[in-house]
Amino acid sequence: MRTHELVLQWIEKQLSDGDLTLGGRLPGERAMAEQLQVSRTSVREAVRILEAMGVVRAGVGSGKDAGTVVIAEPGSALGSTLRLHVATRHLPVADIVETRVLLESWAAERAHVGVPALTEAAELLDQMDVAPDIDSFLALDARFHVALAQAAGNSVVSAMMASLRGAIENYASELTGNLPDWNATCSRLRAEHRAILAAVNNNDGGKAAELVAAHIQGFYKEAGVGSSPLPT
Amino acid sequence: MRTHELVLQWIEKQLSDGDLTLGGRLPGERAMAEQLQVSRTSVREAVRILEAMGVVRAGVGSGKDAGTVVIAEPGSALGSTLRLHVATRHLPVADIVETRVLLESWAAERAHVGVPALTEAAELLDQMDVAPDIDSFLALDARFHVALAQAAGNSVVSAMMASLRGAIENYASELTGNLPDWNATCSRLRAEHRAILAAVNNNDGGKAAELVAAHIQGFYKEAGVGSSPLPT
DNA sequence: ATTACAGTGTGGTTAGACCACAGTGGTAGG
DNA sequence: CCTACCACTGTGGTCTAACCACACTGTAAT
């Protein structure tokens, strides 16, 4: 077993034993190196991995933001991973769209009314009405969909949707070039968003799920990407 | 921007530009360090991150398995990430079970008959009939469910199911202690697996989806975990 | 009381060295 | 001629020792 994996194992044990909790600080890199009888290099490689996984955040200097502290951001970490794999051309757009439909319609059907995520979703819709350009509109759009998914209260589904956000923004941005009339599409999307949120707040989960599925598939169809599943 | 992030960016560009493809080799660590005018340490940290993401695999020595080569294993990478976050107690079991039901019933309904993954699934069932102990049975069980999910041909859903595999094995192993009679449960599970596979091969997607959902929820219910969604 | 500054500890980065490993190719012995 | 051996080469893996920038902290001078 490689040295940095040993360090990783040690830190993971501290986590599952509860010796390290959310917001807690890891010992300094030099201290860990001495305690585990390894070089600081190996400790650093382990920390780098944890950082990439969204488990810790490293900060220089001293005080509140300094040191290596435990965080919980699986979404952004899974997002970078997906982005890298998309770069290797091994995750087709159609599959991402299909997965979105699956996750989001499920979440829309089970959204808990009154949850903070829905308030955030409503605010995002207001911001989208005055978005200055296409890309900022799409960024808000992606955040709206993530917020909607969070409303179902399943942390795994939330993390997965958050991880898709980056990919969604990218592809949406590329596909807008295929649209005949952005202004018309934009207006339609905004109306659909309002209808979805209304259905959710009205406790009409079934309708919300249908609307979400139609909303997502409608955009990608219009932008020139079919929604039919492709074999890997 | 930190130095290793610069290296990461450079490698990602090589990937999206197609200069680096699946199975391709990265330049040696020393060569990259010189080319980018950074230290070998920084290059190594970047490579370490890519390795954690399942984008590359590092091998010592020379020849076929040597050097740092581009692979595509988002599943195992996402799996480790999820495992770490479970260790921080931020991903409840109930959410994982719920997500399994969602992904697997969807996949069962859309499984493509005749695809290699289904052949593998059938072989796994045969091996489960002669599994020597509980843990190896559960390991095969988890692989069976992943294979089933792959049959739908959506690479994103496949990667997500693969990433859940580790968590599934862990929790299933812990929960078997709650079962009144393992032998009885094991027989039932085997029969249910056969029924699911038969429904899939019979092109009866709807029935397969129902059976899968009942199969997963049944086990966790029997082992003492409710299937009701919990707020985060 | 306020200001300026040296001190301390953090992660970030670098250079240079050595190791184990696995193939390659030359060479000595059969 | 063939075989067995062995030095060579290039890979990632690890380690040491140093320096940097940063941000806070305590102290001393104003």
Image (cartoon, coloured by chain):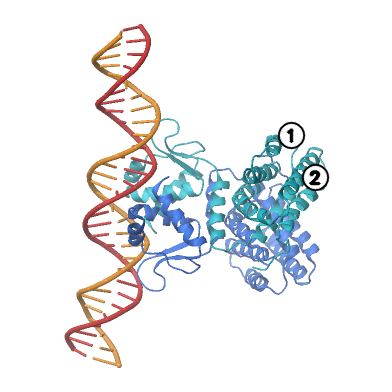
Chain colours: A blue, B cyan, C orange, D red
Residue occupied by mark 1: B114
Residue under the point 32% across and 53% down:
A39
The chain to which mark 1 is attached is B
Q: Is residue A141 above or below residue A120?
A: above
Determine the image quadrant of residue B231: bottom right
Q: Secondary structure at mark 2?
A: helix
- Relative vertical location of residue B216 with respect to residue C23 in this rendering, above or below: below
Rendered residue at 42%/51% (across/down):
A6
Residue A1 vertical position relative to residue B171 in the rendered view, above or below: above
Q: Which residue is at a point 70% across and 34% down the rendered structure image?
A: B119
Left or right of A128? Residue A196 is right
Residue A181: percent from left, percent from top: 68, 57
Give the mark nearest the N terminus, 2 or 1.
1
Residue B17 left/right relative to B67:
right
* Mark 2 crowd level (few <14, some 14–19, many ≥20, 10 Å Cα): many
Tag 2 subunit: B
What is the three-letter code of the residue carrying label 1?
A: Gly
Q: Nearer the viewer, residue C11 or A4?
A: A4
Where's residue C21, x and y in %? Answer: 38, 34
Between the residue at mark 2 and the residue at mark 1, the CA separation in whole angstroms equals 14 Å
Q: Which residue is mark 2?
A: B205
Q: Are marks 2 and 1 in contact (CB under 8 Å)?
A: no
Label 1: state its secondary structure: loop
Q: Is residue A56 left or right of residue B95?
A: left
Position of the N terminus of chain B by quadrant: bottom left
Residue A48 lies in quadrant:
bottom left
**With respect to residue A49, does B198 lie above or below?**
above
Q: Is residue B12 visible?
A: no
Describe residue B17's horizontal placement relative to residue B170 as left or right: left
